[in-house]
Amino acid sequence: MARVFSGIQPTGQLHVGNYLGAIRNWVAVQAEHDCVFSIVDLHAMTIPYDPAELPQRVLATAATLIGCGIDPERSILYVQSHVREHSELCWILNCITPLGSLQRMTQFKDKAKQHQENVNAGLLNYPILQAADILLYKAALVPVGEDQVQHLELSRDLARRFNHLFGETFPEPQALLTRAARVMALNDPTRKMSKSIPGSFVALTAPPEEIQGLIRRAVTDTGPRGESMSPGVANLFTLLESFSAPETVAQFREAYEQGALRYVDLKQQLAEDMVRALTPIRERYTELMSRQDELKELLAYGADRARAIARDTMEEVRDKTGLVLGTSAAAPTAARAT
Ligand code: AQP
């Protein structure tokens, strides 16, 4: 079984974009691979956040992932900062990463624009921490959406560079290409749906009235109807394809082709099907959040299993990079004599 690694940031409520772009694939690969899934709180610190809220966000992220079908017994599910080796490997990789390759990252440029008041070094170094996450577990496969391909490429470069400088240590992680939809923001379909942009997303744990309201208000056409489908309508069809039966999608596509589609009907159908699909996730989430001690225990169990792998890797890395002092008996005697 190949080892798979992936992570998700506790930067807010997980949404249908996270589900269709990542989580549903994580659930699917659990059956055939040895999976390590991390709630990457160290990554979440690269943008402004409230330390008093972070622990609840981490627990809510864990409860949502389990609610979606991540099995914490079968897969390793843990919190990144609970395994200190992530930060240590990150520092070592920092020292072999060319600055230029970080400055070229599209996500850095986007986030630096979005958080102009706080363009910190962590935001720039984010892909190095991501490489450390993957390499720490010597993961062979990483499920990625198209927005993460550039970062995975850096992880591969760093694995190669490390192996060249210090000896064969890390396998080069490969992209696990899965069926992943890119979901756009409901209030601005030219940008991706994001947990940190209010009004852009439908949370996986949203109650039915909230889902209905968000879909009802979703942007469709901003100007007169043109030749091609507008980004807002295309986004609603992406969601419909994911949550509704194929016959329903075909029926609405046909209505669109014939110019007979009423957006109000499309939205109503989509909201109804989303509510049906998301209700079991919300129910399981609510149940888990009412038993937070159990949730914490599950995460501690995950961290123990993750740490066992991470420790072995770091022992090897410390040795290869010259951080182990060795056992020469002569040195202390000489030191005492002076
Ligand atoms: N809109 C999206 N459509 C498809 N996939 C998406 N992902 C995120 N948004 C969409 C995928 O979800 C996984 C986990 O993402 P993340 O939480 O680590 O970071 P992100 O991509 O930055 O997600 P957000 O929601 O946009 O968070 P914020 O607002 O904090 O930046 C990734 O595999 C990602 O591709």
Image (spheres, helix red, strand yellow):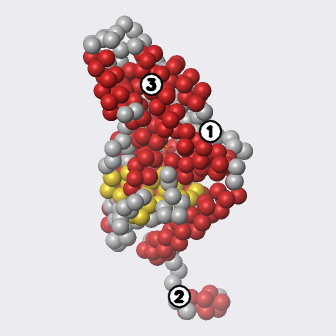
Q: Which residue is mark 1?
A: 48
User: Identity of the amino acid at label 1?
Assistant: Pro
- Return the residue nearer the eye: 297 or 282: 282
Is residue 319 at least partly visible in the picture? yes
Q: Position of residue 277 (x, y in %)?
A: 49, 38
- Frontmost of labels 3 and 1 is 3
Quadrant of the image containing the C terminus: bottom right
Residue lying at the far top of the rendered structure: 224
Residue 60 x/y as whole percent:
62, 46
Quarter of the picture holding the N terminus: bottom left
User: Is residue 105 among the parts visible in the rendering?
Assistant: no
Left or right of 288 in this view: 167: left
Of callouts 3 and 1, the N-terminal one: 1
Coordinates of residue 150 in the picture (x, y in percent): 35, 45
Q: Amino acid at mark 2?
A: Thr
Assess disc 2: are there few (<14), some (14-19) or many (≥20) residues with their C-alpha within 10 Å of its C-alpha. few
Per the image, label 1 sits on a secondary structure element best described as: loop
Q: Residue at x 48, y 62 (%)?
A: 75
Q: Which residue is mark 3?
A: 269
Foreground residue among 99 and 253: 253
- Residue 142 quadrant: bottom left
Q: Decide: few, some or many residues near mark 1? Use Cα within 10 Å; few <14, some 14-19, many ≥20.
A: few
- As shown in the figure, which amino acid type bears the numbered disc 3? Gln
Residue 244 vs residue 225, the one in the foreground: 244
Structural crowding at the residue carrying mark 3, measured as other residues with C-alpha within 10 Å and reported as few (<14), some (14–19) or many (≥20): some
Whole-angstrom CA distance, mark 3 to mark 1, is 37 Å
Upstream in sequence: badge 2 or badge 1: 1
SS of the residue at dot 2? Answer: loop
Q: Which residue is mark 2?
A: 327
Viewed as shown, does residue 47 lie left or right of 32?
Answer: right
Between the residue at mark 2 and the residue at mark 1, the CA separation in whole angstroms equals: 45 Å
Up the image or down, 312 lies above or below 203; here it is below
